[in-house]
Image (tube, rainbow, N blue to C red):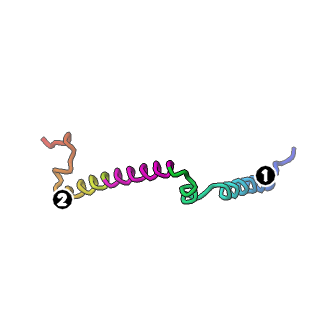
Amino acid sequence: MQSFPWLRFTGVSVGLMTVGYLLMKATTPSPEKLYNEMAPDLRRKVDAARSLRLAQEAEMKKQVDAQLANESRPDDAKPIWADSK
């Protein structure tokens, strides 16, 4: 019974993964390059989605800051159903 050639198997596996990674890096454009190559109508859609996302994040940050400001009053920070009756 022959033993399995682990060293050769490992070398071939690492070689294939390296070739795949290098191929991916060579063919995938950067986000800036992809944005610059877009059609103007797609670029407007991307800009609109980006501004909407930033507005939603700003609103969420404002809510988080408001909740953190209420931590000085622990009764206001509790949920409604957590009454201590």
The mark that comes first in sequence, 1 or 2, is: 1
Name the one closer to the observer, 66 or 71: 66
Identify whether 80 is placed above or below 28.
above
Q: Tell me the quarter of the picture where residue 64 sits.
A: bottom left
Query: What's under tag 2, amino acid-wise?
Result: Ser
Query: In the rendered view, does 40 fall on the left or right side of 85?
Result: right
Number of numbered labels in the structure image: 2
Q: Indicate the position of residue 17 as horizontal and vertical percent values.
A: 71, 54
Counting other residues with Cα less than 10 Å from the Cα at mark 1, is it few (<14), some (14-19), or many (20 or more)? few
Q: Indicate the position of residue 82 as horizontal and vertical percent values.
A: 20, 42
Part of the protein shown in magenta: 41-58
- The residue wearing badge 1 is 9
Asked if the stretch drawn in magenta spans residue 44, the answer is: yes
Name the residue rendered at 81%, 54% in the picture. 8
- The residue wearing badge 2 is 72
Position of the C terminus by quadrant: top left
